[in-house]
Structure formats: structure tokens, C-alpha cells
Image: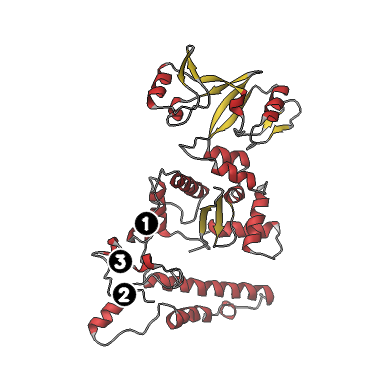
Amino acid sequence: RGSWLDFEFDHHEHLYVRIDRRRKLPVTTLLRAMGLNGSEILSTFFKKTNIKLKAKSCDVEISPDRLRGSIAEFDIVLDKNVVVERGRRITAKHVKVLEKAKVNSINAQHDFLLDKVISEDIIDKDSGEILVHSNTVIVDEVIETLITNKIKKFDILYINDAMGGAYISDTLRIDETETELDARMSIYHVMRPGEPATEDAVNALFNNLFFKNERYDLSKVGRMKLNRRLGIKSETGEHVLTNDDIISVIKLLIDIKNGNDSVDDVDTLANRRVRAIGEMIENQFRIGLVRVEKAVREGLNLAETDELTPQDLINSKPVSAAVREFFGSSQLSQFMDQVNPLSGITHKRRISALGPGGLTRERAGFEVRDVHPSHYGRLCPIETPEGP
């Protein structure tokens, strides 16, 4: 129960998010709205490489296990012998040689730093001024600024195409929001176009989307399946989304993009859940109770409350109307087939992928209607037709 979150890459390899299939926003807007700043977003998704800057060169921190599979951007020299030439791929054999020699850093020319990305704001210690902002791409002018201001140490993002591209860094660069409130405002304008955006309304909308039990519910099964897919050992937890859940899903999507993980099969029964009649009536009952609550609140605000009794305020009609509406006009409400006892039983047992919260006839493609291998021994393909 609740809003849908869809993550997608565009053709520029920027990562976007859609809430309830509305207009897409950069995924970093959602991360900012969750309370992360630019530097925290970068440190969450990237490892760092420490640089010691000198007048004519720089010392680059290296970790041999990170190097495996990457292409050397400069000659890696050990005791005046070239271990790996520039432009060659670093193999497990090269890594073993570097580990044996306990190499922690390698001297490189300033050219190595060009097109690398600064991981955190570089601040002048004397004036407190930000010299270079985080996520800035290094060019010659940036190196000159750092040398002029005697900055000796700083960190760059470790971006290795074999391990993962700079998707989040590139997306952060096109994100126009700068603060948590800006990001929440952007989400508010997408979800409530044309409505005046006050700070309280913006915060209330964002918190209600995914983080409040009244509006969002993963259910026990949903939490268990999500934890298993994200590799979390515990199979229990909150029934709402957490910041860690959203970050883990984004990391998993990046792994899939890089070929380190596979896409789930959406048609297998392992990724589907039977919503029984009891749960559907429970949802209708909840809708009725919400209407009753709204009516009671309005009654308390309008009337003189001193002389009122609970009977005057509480009206049960919205609850009974919601349940009656469910049995009378729901998509899945049908007259039972009573030709004989067997036809009645098969009608009661029949399940459907259509209905509220399920597929629509426009969106249901051939794959959904087809018999999936996971159906064998569980669902009868004849008694469970999806129709036109």
C-alpha cells in the first residue's frame, strides 16, 4: 500500500526517479530530500583516492585489490622497473607484485588528475572560503588554484568503469537543487502541481509518501522479499521504507547496469503474492474508517463540542458504504457460478492478475498472459484465464 518508486537510466546514463509515474526527477533530488548533502551522496556511492599534491607531480594512493581489471593511467614503476605500462590492463599477476612490494602510493604527473572528480569541498583554512566545490571536474585551472593556495592533500572519487561508472556523480551535476528543502519543494511541485508550497506542507507530503505507516505498508512478506533481494540477513523490520532501503536499491540497480547482478523475472510466482479476500476487505474497511475519522474531525472543528456526545459525531454509514461498494462494484466482484457444486468451488478458487493494484488490460502484455514455468503444479492455466 502506498506510492510507487520507479528508478530508470536515460540515454545519457543519468539516473532518475519517478514517484507514482509522475514526471521524472534526478535520483539525487530524492537523496537530498532524505537529508544527504552533495559530499555525503558521493561518499555513499564511491570510494575515495587520496592525493598528495606537489609542485610538479602528485603522489596517488593505490590499493592493489582495487586495481585488478582497470587500465593503468600512467606507468607504474617499482625500483626503476616499469611493472605496468600506461594504457595496459592491470592483471592479477601485477596486483600480486604490488602487494608483495607493499606499495601504498605511486608518483604521477599532474596530467593524471585531469578529468578526475573532487570528492569533498576544499576549504581555505585561513579564510574559510570554499576553493573548490565537491563533484568538480579537475581541469588545469583547478590544479593551479590548489597549488597557489598551498593545498597539499585532498581526495578524488575512485571511478573504475570495470567496477561501476560515474552515474551518481554525473546525475548530481545536473541536479538543480542545493538543500534538503529545495529537493522536497521539487518533489512537491511534481506531486501537487499548482498548489502553494509552504514548508510544513512540503515536509508533510514527503514524510507521508514512504515513511508513515498510515500511508505506506510493505507488509511482512514485502519486507522479507525486499531484505532477501538486497542481501540483508534479517527478514523482519519496519513496514515502511528507510533511507538505507532506498540507497541499497540504487546501488543494486547500478550493479545490474554494470553487469554484476541480474534483473528479476517479473512473471515468476516467487515475485507475486496472492491477495486474499480478507486483506481486500480490510483495505476497504480502512478506507471507510478514514472517512469516519475525517467526518469526526470536521464535526469537532465546526460544532460546539461541550454538549456533543460520541453518538452525535460518529456515523457508521461510511464504513458500511465502503464494504457495500466493494461487494457491489469491485472489479473482482462477480456472481458465483452455481451450475453445480464443482463449478462453484472452481469459481471461488480462481485467482486473477487483474483488479485493484494489479494489472490493467492495456498494460498486460503477452508475457503476463502466458504460462510461466513456475505455474506448473501450482496454478491451472485453464481455470485461471486472464481474458482479453
Q: Disc 2 and disc 1: Cα gap in Å?
A: 23 Å
In this figure, which residue is indicated by the disc labeled 3? Answer: 371
Specify the label residue 334 is tagged with: none
Q: Disc 3 and disc 2: Cα gap in Å?
A: 15 Å
* CB-based contact (under 8 Å), mark 2 and mark 1: no
Q: In this rendering, would 170 be left or right of 321?
A: right
- Residue 353 place in picture, x, y as percent: 38, 70
Disc with the residue nearer the chain's start (3 vs 2): 2
In this figure, which residue is indicated by the disc labeled 2? Answer: 350
Residue at screen point 61% across, 60% down:
205
Residue at screen point 38% across, 67% down:
366
Count residues near mark 2 (Cα–Cα under 10 Å), then give few for <14, some for 14-19, many for 20+: few
Q: In this rendering, would 325 be left or right of 278?
A: right
Say which quarter of the image contains residue 52: top right
> Number of marks in the image?
3
Q: Disc 1 and disc 3: Cα gap in Å?
A: 13 Å
* Quadrant of the frame with the C terminus: bottom left
- Residue 21 place in picture, x, y as percent: 54, 62
In this figure, which residue is indicated by the disc labeled 1? Answer: 265
Q: Amino acid at mark 2?
A: Arg
- Eye-nearest disc, 3 or 2: 3
**Residue situated in front as seen by the camera: 138 or 239:** 138
Above/below status of 306 relative to 268? below
- Residue 80 place in picture, x, y as percent: 49, 12
Disc with the residue nearer the chain's start (2 vs 1): 1
Q: Amino acid at mark 3?
A: Val
Outermost residue, right side? 127
Count residues near mark 3 (Cα–Cα under 10 Å), then give few for <14, some for 14-19, many for 20+: some
Disc with the residue nearer the chain's start (1 vs 3): 1
